Amino acid sequence: MAKKVKANKKGKKPHKNNPTSKKYTKYKMVGDKLVRDKCCPRCGPGIFLMDNKGRLYCGKCHYSEFESKNDVKTEAKK
Ligand SMILES: [Zn+2]
């Protein structure tokens, strides 16, 4: 007789590791110099902007910057 394994929803949850911050991808070594990606103008250095198809976005203060061909529009939502 096979025993059915019940999904135990109560009690301790199995430990899951959180995905690590990929902040190191924002730093690059060019020759001897350390080059950083664009930071958030509101949050200051250390807070980087997410890059998505020519759009930069800050996940902390929701600052977004659009970079279309020639004109650069900046928009900030609250
Ligand atoms: Zn920000």
Image: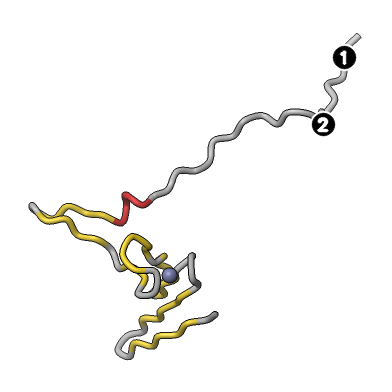
* 11 on left or right of 18: right
Q: Residue at x 91, y 9 (%)?
A: 1
The residue lying toward the viewer, choosing from 10 and 70, is: 10
Report crowding for label 1: few under 14, some 14 to 19, many 20 or more residues within 10 A (C-alpha). Answer: few
* 77 on left or right of 29: right
75 in relation to 28, above or below:
below
Q: Determine which residue is flagged by label 1.
A: 3
Report crowding for label 2: few under 14, some 14 to 19, many 20 or more residues within 10 A (C-alpha). Answer: few
Q: Disc 2, disc 1: CB below 8 Å?
A: no
Q: Position of residue 59 (x, y in %)?
A: 48, 65
Q: Mark 2 or mark 1: which comes first in sequence?
A: 1
| Element on which disc 2 rests | loop
The outermost residue toward the right is 1
Residue kind at label 2, given as amino acid type = Lys
Quadrant position of the C terminus in the picture: bottom right
Residue kind at label 1, given as amino acid type = Lys
Q: Residue at x 36, y 52 (%)?
A: 23
Disc 1 beta carbon < 8 A from ligand 1?
no
Q: Residue at x 85, y 25 (%)?
A: 6
The outermost residue toward the bottom is 71
Give the numbered dot on residue 10.
Answer: 2
2 in relation to 21, above or below:
above
| Element on which disc 1 rests | loop
